[in-house]
Amino acid sequence: MPKNSVLPLLNDTQSTDSTSDEIYERIYLAILEHRLTPGTKLAEERLASIFKASRARVREALSKLAYEQIVEVFPKRGWFVAKPSVEQARDVFEARRLIEPAVMRRLANSMTEEKRAALKEHLNKEMNARKVEDKRAIIRLSGEFHNLAAALAGNSSFTRSLRELSTLTCLVILLYNAPIVASCRADEHERIVVALNQGDGETAAKIMLEHLDHIEGSLDLDSTEEEADLEEIFLR
């Protein structure tokens, strides 16, 4: 859609008068699925029209994303999807290497049938997404695996931190052009779950570190970018 064209109306399946939380979640999901690229300008007026919400609600959602370092705001320029530098990308993986082994150990020591079932269900979703080559679902579910593990481990600080770090990782993967399928392989998630089910936190932690090394190693530091069409992303 041309940038200066009239915004299309929401269809009957799309909600009107979106709350700030709903706006936040939709932007978050668009980033997680690589539909919003690093550096994309998030114009308040356009988003307000797209979501049928006030600019105040849009600003509230963007402020929350900015607090989590997923969005950046620049005086007189506006809001932009974060564009992590190479140094910031390395910082993200350094933080994940400290947090996620601890998540693995904590989760391995607290496994229940309900937790095993939740992990199995998630792996099945990943496998099905790969079978039908649903790229968006593959990307989203790959990131959500790490968030699910943190939530099941039962430490709210781990959960909150990993949600932010996982989203930043998605931006890094997109910005530095890592192959999606290679960057977060389902078989590595399966090996982690096997170790967790056996109560072997040390093995799960070791595999997780190898997994993070594999993701970081797939990055290409030569970035590419193009302007995103917000209407196409949120209204199609």
Image: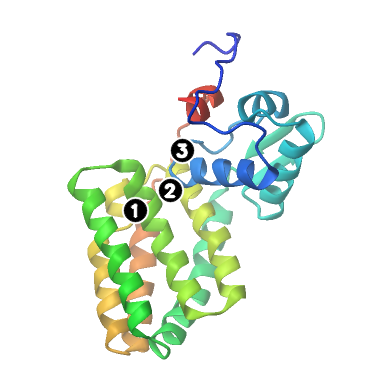
Label 1 Cα neighbours within 10 Å, binned few <14 / some 14-19 / many ≥20: some
Q: Kindly state the secondary structure of the residue where label 1 is placed.
A: loop
In the displayed structure image, the side of residue 204 where residue 130 appears, left or right = left
Provide the residue designation for mark 2: 173
Q: Kindly state the secondary structure of the residue where label 3 is placed.
A: loop
In the displayed structure image, the side of residue 227 where residue 221 appears, left or right = left
Mark 3 or 2, nearer chain start = 2
Mark 2 or 1, nearer chain start = 2
Provide the residue designation for mark 3: 223
Q: Amino acid at mark 3?
A: Ser
Question: Alpha-carbon distance for marks 3 and 2?
Answer: 10 Å
Callouts 2 and 1 close, C-beta under 8 Å: yes
- Quarter of the image with the C terminus is top left
Decide if residue 14 is in sight here: yes
Provide the residue designation for mark 1: 218
Q: Amino acid at mark 1?
A: Ser
Q: Is residue 232 above or below residue 181?
A: above
Residue 163 picture location, percent across and down: 54, 61
